Image (cartoon, rainbow, N blue to C red):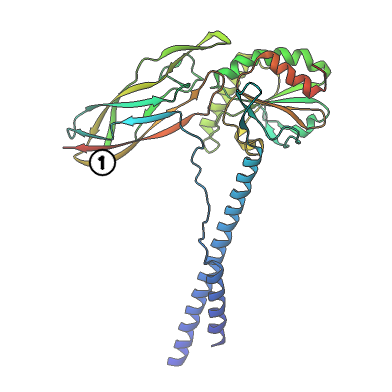
Amino acid sequence: MLAIRVAAVVAVSALTLTAQAPFPGLQSSAPRGKAAVAYLFPEQVTVAAGKPSAVDLHFRVSDGLHVNSHTPHTEDLIPTTLKLKDAAVQLSKVDYPVGRDFAFDVDLKEKLNVYTGEFIVHAEFVAVKGDHLVEATLRYQACDNSTCMPPRSIPVAIDVIAK
Amino acid sequence: MKRGTLIVKRNVIVLCVVVLVVGMLSLAGWANYQNRKQQAELLQVQQAKAELVPDNASVARMVSPLVGKPAPNFTLTNLKGEKVSLASYKGKAVQLNFWATWCAPCKIETPWLIDLRKQYAGQGFEILGVSFDDLDKEDKFLLAKEKTGIEKSVAQLQIPYPVLLDGDSISKPYGDPEVYPTSFFVDRSGTIVAASFGLNSKAELEGNIRKALGVAN
């Protein structure tokens, strides 16, 4: 009887102490700051189930910034790359646009190959029949005329309806 | 007998409840500790974070609140695997140069840094290159590949000063810089006397080095 009473007191005290939300304010480790690249459209595509279907994915680089193209001139630079990991939808082919050459004002010899403004990535999906909300990712690394930001990935959310 | 069985069952229930409660207490304690730790780190970053402020010509420039304060100490590993501590450079003027192999402006300024180091080394000036290249510490194969990539860049750029790895691990006390290159100029007493963000002119770099050395411009 005494043991039950002691346990009851301990239980009530502990429940009172833990009454506040157990995980207040725990932050996610999402990257800070505004993304340099935004995914524009499409949000939804209808494709033929089981067959490669072409989709043009539109992105925009923020004004004043550039990102490396998919084929930068040196291997230590981080290319813009689209990836997708999904059980129902496979990325069978990705064609990236051709970048344009860019050089910093202070060193015109060092040429980069970059995307600016709006650019389109041509992708081919193969999807099993059904409605699939997929989240591809676009990885890029952005700079302006004098600074570079760390590499970053943005989600590319698309509703793929395979009929 | 029946009474005895009942008592045993009751005690088992009581024991289970106590274990559950202790478990919940531990979980809550851990969660509170994690929360307090994250809040402290966030506060540290906020206090050290650079801000955009307009200068006399209304041009926005990044300004660090760390200028005038002691440089946060750290110990990192160089490319040879040796530990290097900022404190061991007390008495020297030091430029902490935050860079990465994927940073094109960093590569543009590196030859200037090499020249300036050569010019001012005799007066007690040193540069510590702190790499902010990602390191996959969980994957030994990838980690080795990443370190080789950094070594290759260092060799290509002919960097003669120490290059330290894993800059991300000391990022918070330095305000979590979001642009590269970023440099902090530390005087002989260990105080940050200037900070620069992005690609600046060689003349501006030299001006900051002279500040760190305590030499008039």
Does B86 sit above or below residue B210?
below
Give me the residue at 45% from left, 87% from top. Answer: B6
Q: Is residue A87 visible?
A: no
Query: Which quadrant is the N terminus of chain B positioned in?
Result: bottom left
Quarter of the image for residue B130 reads: top right
Residue A72 x %, y %:
45, 16
- Badge 1 marks a residue whose secondary structure is strand
Q: Depth check: B117 or B19 in front?
A: B117
Quarter of the image for residue B33 reads: bottom right
Residue A138 x %, y %:
39, 30
In the picture of the structure, the residue carrying the numbered disc 1 is A132
Q: Is residue B82 left or right of residue B131?
A: right
Residue A131 x %, y %:
22, 42
Q: Amino acid at mark 1?
A: His
Residue A143 x %, y %:
51, 22
Give me the residue at 27% from left, 36% from top. Answer: A89
Crowdedness near tag 1: few (<14), some (14–19) or many (≥20) residues, C-alpha within 10 Å: some
Query: Which quadrant is the C terminus of chain B positioned in?
Result: top right
